[in-house]
Image: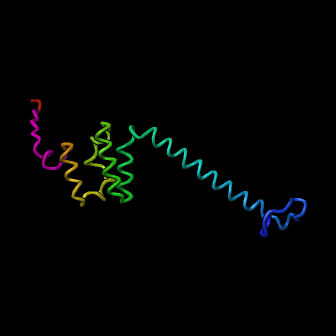
């Protein structure tokens, strides 16, 4: 392969061939496509186990809509990470979003709901 098109290898001096350059480009494209395919398969496989984690990564990246989609999935899958949602700082980009308080209310973890919990502590004498 040359800049002028395809030619027989025997008709092109090695110094004029662009085969190694285009071959390297094709290798990079193939590797990128394989990495994307593997990422997609891993994502599908672990979706149920990592919905909460995916949500906080998206929230940290300021992808609010997608973060709320994944928070909904975390609720659907019963993700135990939701227990620590009030102290997870990676969700701080969502705090001003009106959906944040509604979401916390839906899962019983809004500030008002938590403040209403009565504690009775009995100290030993």
Where the N terminus falls, by quadrant? Answer: bottom right
Position of residue 18 relative to residue 31, above or below, is: below
Residue sitting nearer the eye, 26 or 80:
26
Coordinates of residue 13 in the picture (x, y in percent): 88, 65
Q: Position of residue 57 (x, y in %)?
A: 39, 52
Asked which quadrant contains residue 76, the reply is top left
In which quadrant will I find the C terminus? top left
Q: Is residue 106 left or right of residue 2?
A: left
**Between residues 16 and 81, which one lies in front from this camera angle?**
16
Residue at the outermost right position: 10
Q: Which one is in front, 42 or 84? A: 42
Locate residue 89 relative to residue 27 in the image: left or right: left
> Which of these two is toward me, 28 or 9?
9
Q: How is the image coloured?
A: rainbow
The residue located at (20%, 53%) in the rendering is 101
Position above or below: 28 against 115: below
Main secondary structure of the magenta stretch: loop
Left or right side of 75 for 8: right
Left or right, 12 with respect to 40, comes to: right
Span highlighted in magenta in the image: 109-122
Where residue 114 sits, quadrant-wise, is top left
Q: Position of residue 73 (x, y in %)?
A: 32, 43
Q: Is residue 43 magenta?
A: no
Identify the residue shown where x is 34% and y is 52%: 67
Residue 45 is situated, as x and y percent measured from the top left of the image, at: 46, 38
């Amino acid at each position: 392969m040359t800049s002028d098109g395809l030619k027989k290898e025997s008709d092109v001096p090695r110094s004029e061939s662009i085969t190694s350059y285009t071959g390297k480009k094709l290798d990079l494209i193939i590797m990128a496509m394989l990495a994307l395919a593997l990422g997609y398969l891993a994502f599908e496989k672990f979706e149920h186990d990592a919905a909460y984690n995916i949500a906080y990564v998206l929230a940290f990246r300021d992808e609010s809509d997608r973060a709320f989609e994944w928070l909904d999935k975390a609720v659907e899958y019963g993700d135990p990470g939701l227990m620590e949602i009030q102290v997870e700082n990676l969700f701080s980009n969502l705090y001003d979003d009106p959906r944040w308080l509604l979401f916390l209310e839906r899962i019983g973890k809004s500030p008002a709901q938590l403040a209403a919990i009565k504690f009775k502590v009995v100290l030993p004498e």
